Image (cartoon, helix red, strand yellow):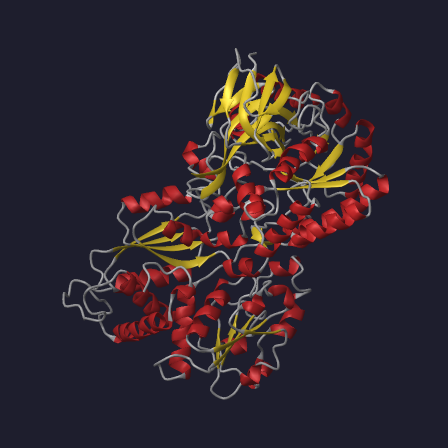
Amino acid sequence: MPRIVVLGASPLGGAPVDIVMDGDRIVEVVGAGKTDTGGARTIDAHGLVALPGFVDLHTHLREPGREDAETVESGTRAAALGGFTCVHAMANTEPVADTAGVVEQVWRLGKEAQWCEVRPVGAVTVGLAGQHMAELGAMAASAAQVRLFSDDGKCVDDAVIMRRALEYVKAFDGAVAQHAQEPRLTEGAQMNEGVLSGTLGLRGWPAVAEEAIIARDVLLTQHVNSRLHVCHVSTAGSVELIRWAKAKGINVTAEVTPHHLLLTDELARSYDPHFKVNPPLRTQEDVIALREGLADGTIDAVATDHAPHPVEDKECEWSAAAFGMLGLETALSVVVESMVNTGLLDWAGVADRMSTRPAQIGRVKDQGGSIAAGEPAHLTLIDPGATWTVRPTELASLSRNTPYRERVLPGRVVHTIYAGNQTVTDGTAQRTR
Amino acid sequence: MKRHLLSAADLSHSDALLVLDTAAQLARVADRPVKKLPTLRGRTVVNLFFEDSTRTRISFEAAAKRLSADVINFSAKGSSVSKGESLKDTALTLEAMGADAVVVRHGSSGAPHRLASSGWIGGSVVNAGDGTHEHPTQALLDAFTLRENLVGGEGDLTGKKVTIVGDVLHSRVARSNVLLLSTLGADVTLVAPPTLLPIGVETWPCKVSYDLDPVIPESDAVMMLRVQLERMTDSYFPTAREYSRRYGLDNHRMSLLSERSIVMHPGPMNRGMEITADVADSKRSVIVEQVANGVSVRMAVLYLLLGGNAPAATPINEPSEGI
């Protein structure tokens, strides 16, 4: 592995420095132009912002089972292009990641692909069926070292199962990542319940269905003194509840998706299923509350909920379409548009919400560090002034279901370095080892 | 007129009047011995029905045939991504057949909108009822019927009080009627139990009441919506009897109507549920008239969307052609 010297990058947007990496570590950070580059591979990063590699808490890689939509290889390549050096692979595969065997398979596929670290998320219940707890201990003790458990796509709605899972994961410093959706209140739900769902004649997904579960779960978490992570928070009321829970000292963390920071339910007017997602796009008031929650730290992390689907599952009528949208390759740009360009978050804030805190929540040891000597060599270099046009066919994902088609977005990931290897060079994914 | 008719909101005040006036002209054709016009000869109208609805389909079929269009009935019940051919493939098939207009009935809200905006087909799309969204030609025929009965068949419906009663939440008829009748100047009041009104109904261009009795005496027309019994098992209301007592139209309530007020129903009726047999068959009931007006209004829509060059109601000469 050659030494890499990043020349003239601005860590967290600060004064330009040279960053020297050797092996999988950063060995030196010095003022720009003071480095001996002899024999090293150099990356000209003048004008680029350097951030620690991003960590995604919520990625659907679809393998095993739906390799037509995404594979570990294609999904992690997309992740690298988005500036990620670690993703958490959700458990709703076929078969479900509810055993040590499946999580180890996904973990191993990630290791082989080498685009970024893959941390499998284990299912809370067998087959995501919500009935019997899966072997959480076996998954935790496996080579995959699972620490986050989630039935994502489905809510652990049975209060007793949720309580037991919260208690059980304490044995190995785990957390339950809840997909908060009261199932009876959302039967057949198609979009946010509000003025627009009534007009469009689409069955509503009320905010209370998310908030009621979050309220219950933070209280359960307090009662059993465990750790809860709330997936894809989407409503203003949820932000309020989490703010309240944190103020009470309850050990809860939360994530928000890029699309919930930027898009609203108004897009459903088109009946274009590319805007169909679960939880649904909400109102502008919710978007503002989510941005504020992320800015003040009530919401800990941005997580993509990258959800690839084959063309035919989106090229149809709304109610027949699958829920979900791509997110890995557009996440940074959407965060720049919604949080940085609005003045709500500086680059240190972006690093905190997209790298440091998600790594802590996932208990990922060698991710989310700072840009300093001795830290792991995971780096994302961003051109903050660039803009680009999203073209579905040019994305690395096997699927094309982005909601940002033909949209011009600010901020571009130029280079990504994962464990001392450059995975993205000038916006192109390529392995250097 | 826009190229498609997807929502009653697509119709401006003048568009709506144009459709109604054209329909009135075309209605006179029905009184002739030969009920057929050459207007759309050589044009193809496809009735694409993903959902059973014999009455709407035959109404559109009769309308297209009276204008001499070629009619293809395409029943694609149960078609969806999960069960067979996709909406897209069906659309591409119709496009290959050269459809000038596609009349779509679909169980999924927005499906006609998808067809119109996807680029899959080039012809005009007419929404013949989509899910719980809209049914604009039903609203047009209701407006036509109201105009004939309340204001002498001309102009708009300014100041006329129309009460729509029943399952507004799941009703495409109610949505389209609120939009169109308010465009035409009518004062619309929706009456339903709170469980059967959508969130946000207070933003619609109408009034809302949970009680039927106070609204009846001031109504120029009362339109009863079909209430499906399965709503009871979903706890929208406790029992059919309680629903009928609180929201059904019976002889007593009908007696509180003013002298010239009319009773409407889009059909099919649940006699004994939202409307009693006596009311449905009474002199005030214009339910059968609504069906007849449906053909005229749909003729007008097809004629205007397909831009027939000849005047709408030129009689046909060839004796070989007749119904």
Left or right of B157 in this view: B27:
left
Left or right of A44 in this view: A351:
right
Left or right of A262 in this view: B155:
left
Left or right of B239 in this view: A252:
right
Where's the N terminus of chain B, which quadrant?
A: bottom left
Whether residue A71 is visible to the viewer of this picture, yes or no, is: no
Q: Nearer the viewer, residue B41 or A288?
A: A288
Q: Nearer the viewer, residue A9 or B319?
A: A9
Where's the C terminus of chain B, which quadrant?
A: bottom left
Q: Is residue A196 above or below residue B78?
A: below
Q: Is residue B194 above or below residue A280?
A: below
Q: Residue A410: horizontal and vertical position, in percent?
A: 48, 41
Q: Residue B87: horizontal and vertical position, in percent?
A: 41, 45
The residue that appears at 46% across and 66% down in the rendered structure is B176
Q: Is residue B277 above or below residue A296?
A: below
Q: Is residue A263 above or below residue B163?
A: above
Q: Residue A211: horizontal and vertical position, in percent?
A: 70, 51
The residue that appears at 60% across and 38% down in the rendered structure is A347
Q: Nearer the viewer, residue B293 or A195?
A: A195
